[in-house]
Image (spheres, grey):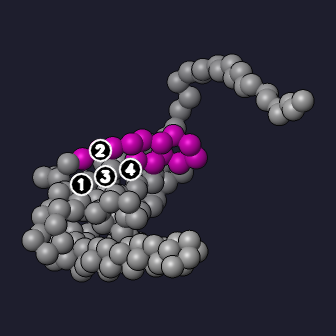
Amino acid sequence: MSAFSKQVATATRQTREEAKRLTLKTALLKHHAVKEAFDMIPLNLRKNATVSLSGFSNSVFINVSMYNLNSFKDKKFTALLERFIDWETTTNDYAYHLPNKDVRFDKREHDDKVGSFTISVQVMAYVKEDSPLCRIVTTGFTEEVVRKEIKQIVCA
């Protein structure tokens, strides 16, 4: 067998193994725990929800966006958060154009057929721009000095 033929055989085997792994991994999307997590999102928000599968880990992501909230105390937002109260939670606030809070809920699951996996539900909440209850204010300034090396190739 030539060196090229060996390389083709190796690449073919690896591609088939990866295809088999991805086929097994897609079973996560149909897992009852994923459906249960998706069903925890209120019906009127499901049209804004997306479901995806991680390319790097055994994780299923469910993302939902909420727009035009009066504040982060808005009942629609807090009611959704309460549904995932028992899940591991992380929060990030963003003060760019609109007040934005991302809340991520993670839950580890195990199934004998698919193994261990994580379900991550991320709620991205945006307060409306003209909200009198929640706004972005400047509280200070920082200055940064950036120094970058300039490099070139020099050959003799």
Which residue is pictured at 29% across the width and 62% down the height?
A: 59
Residues in magenta, as a range: 89-101
149 left or right, relative to 50: right
Q: Quadrant of residue 28?
A: bottom left
How would you rate the neighbour count of disc 2 (Cα within 10 Å): few for under 14, some for 14-19, many for 20 or more? few
Q: Which numbered circle lies on residue 104?
A: 3
How would you rate the neighbour count of disc 1 (Cα within 10 Å): few for under 14, some for 14-19, many for 20 or more? some
The residues bearing labels 1 and 3 have C-alpha atoms spaced at a distance of 7 Å
Instruction: Tell me where residue 68 appears, x and y as whole percent.
Output: 46, 59
User: Is residue 21 rendered magenta in the image?
Assistant: no
- Toward the viewer: 34 or 124? 34
Amino acid identity at mark 1? Asp
Say which element carries label 4.
strand
**Which residue position is annotated with label 1?**
106
User: Is residue 93 rendered magenta in the image?
Assistant: yes
Q: Which numbered circle lies on residue 90?
A: 2
